[in-house]
Image: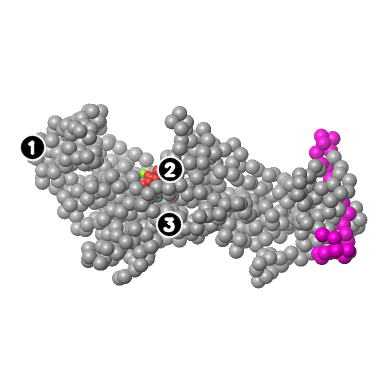
Amino acid sequence: MAIEASNFIEEFINEDLAEGKVTTVHTRFPPEPNGYLHIGHCKALAIDFGTAKKYGGMCNLRMDDTNPAKEDTEYVDAIKEDIHWLGFDWEDRFFYGSDYFDKDYEYAVELIKKGLAYVCELSADQMDEYRGDLQNPAKSPWRDRPMEESLDLFERMKNGEFPDGKYTLRAKIDLASGNFWMRDPVIYRIKHMHHHRHGDKWCIYPTYDFAHPIQDALEGITHSLCSLEFEIHRPLYNWVIENVSVPHTPRQIEFARLNITNTVLSKRFLRGLVESGQVDGWDDPRMPTLCGLRRRGYTGASIVDFCGRIGVAKSDSLVDLRLLEACIRDELNETAPRRVAVLDPIKVIIDNYPADKTEEFELPNHPQNPEMGTRKVKFTRELYIDAEDFAEVPPPKFFRLKPDGEVRLMGAYIIKCGEIVKNADGSIKEIHATADLETGNGNPVDGRKIKGTIHWLSADNTIDAEVILYENLLTLEDPSKLPEDKQYTDYINENSKTVLKNAKLEPSLADAKPGDKFQFVRTGYFCVDTKNPGVFNRVVTLKDGYKPAK
Ligand code: ATP
Ligand code: MG
């Protein structure tokens, strides 16, 4: 099976295939069901499922629920939904890490019998105190406890005879190891806690480092792909595989975690935002969760595309959030129908246009794709334009509407600004203008040049909507540079959500369904909110100056 490797993981796999260590590729994605998946998980998913697919292999979905503290079935269901949404499928290979508790126990007993594990009586604090340093080995006074005694105590730990923390089971490896994870690590601890799947059957639970390699081996995983923080645990992973009689020998390979500017990818942090009410739930469109991105208007394909563009590296790096935005922008540029929306309306009255007249102009649904057709929009004496497209005191090079200036109404007449009528508070009530009615959607007959084009709607033909604009949730660009005396929540961007309650949309948008996506000409890509159908979320602006490196 000669497949050209496109990253270092595939190079390792090719070696294993060439050396005959494996004949197939079987991976797994092991989320802990203690929160919703975020875009960092998508990187892992794309690697786990993508690598298996490339080699014609399989990928399991396994809930890593060995720790009884914080699991929740709400999260399990959400994780499954998000993975399917991205387009990955585990078929019938859905597992729970906790379903191997019996096996974990058996293998622990096997280690004790081999003299490779012992019951220890140190408290967590004492263990810390005794762990030694690079010059000095750890101390472990119970290391030479007779095997029979450890066997007996371990069984009684299981039977619930002791309180939490009284004993632990430790692997007997190397107290002098330069890798502290090998200094007789704890592999079982007493926790009188209810497990969401196994109730009160167990009061001892294996540690991740002991349970994970066993789960991989029992499922026949060939390559256990994980993020870089597990690199230092790899010797322990291999030690477990070598010393218990599991049926397979999986290989752990680590890749760099995804880090994104102005974003913290940690379920714990994201849960904190939800619980403290700083965002409106896990699916708040500002959240980097998959459900948040989906509600914002991202597609699964655009996120998988992003994971492909950033590639798979062995060292940590920081990816610009604008690269993710570029991915959805590229997709929606192709697929999203164009529509007109006036986000912050001001009224324009065309003085020389009859009050009882209505015309229709034809606008393309996608200027670069005629197959998407056209639609008619009505033109009347009273119009709306966006407040941003008018300046009473225009800055240099302002080519939109300004006193005495001319501008083209997109697809319709050229108008010239006349009287500006104000409200008592100084705000603009309406702008009067005259249209060059000879031109229609053409050029002025006298050949004068009109530089600006703005969008507009007939004031008598609109529907009302709420439009929400989003900015980065955090103002801290590099999340790894959090000053010591600060917390991420000190960097919440107060302008991350701007609600425009008075937007006017062209009437065709009355049929838009939750999740439908459009380009509102000149203002960005928008998606109908899935919880509040009268609300449009801005997915992303039309353009920014960002040029990805490749
Ligand atoms: P969090 O800190 O957000 O809870 P985690 O690593 O504890 O993240 P898990 O549910 O244990 O979350 O993760 C499942 C898989 O996703 C693991 O293999 C982990 O390596 C991977 N993963 C999590 N976050 C990222 C990330 N930012 N980039 C790449 N992979 C990630
Ligand atoms: Mg975790």
Q: Is residue 199 visible?
A: yes
Give the answer, above or below, for where 254 lies relative to 477.
Answer: below
Going from the N terminus, do you reach mark 3 or mark 1 first? 1
- Neighbor class of circle 1 (other Cα within 10 Å; few <14, some 14-19, many 20+) is some
Tell me the magenta residue range: 423-449
Between disc 3 and disc 2, whose residue precedes? Answer: 2
Provide the major secondary structure of the magenta segment: loop
Residue beneath label 3, please?
311
Q: Is mark 2 within 8 Å of ligand 1?
A: yes
Q: Which residue is mark 1?
A: 146
Q: Sequence order check: which comes first, mark 1 or mark 2?
A: 1
The residue depicted at 85 percent of the width and 40 percent of the height is 422
Q: Is residue 430 magenta?
A: yes
Q: Amino acid at mark 1?
A: Pro
Q: Residue at x 82, y 36 (%)?
A: 426
Amino acid carrying label 3: it is Gly
Front label number (1 vs 2)? 2
The residue pinned by badge 2 equals 266
Give the Cα separation between the discs numbered 1 and 2.
43 Å
Residues under numbered marks 3 and 2 in contact, where contact means CB atoms less than 8 Å apart: no
Quarter of the figure with residue 220: bottom left
Residue drawn at (82%, 65%) of the image: 442
* For residue 417, side relative to residue 58 (left or right): right
Q: Amino acid at mark 2?
A: Ser
Question: Dot 3, crowdedness within 10 Å: few (<14), some or many (≥20)?
Answer: few
Quadrant containing the N terminus in the rendered view? bottom left
Task: In this rendered view, identify the residue nearer to me: 149 or 339.
Answer: 339
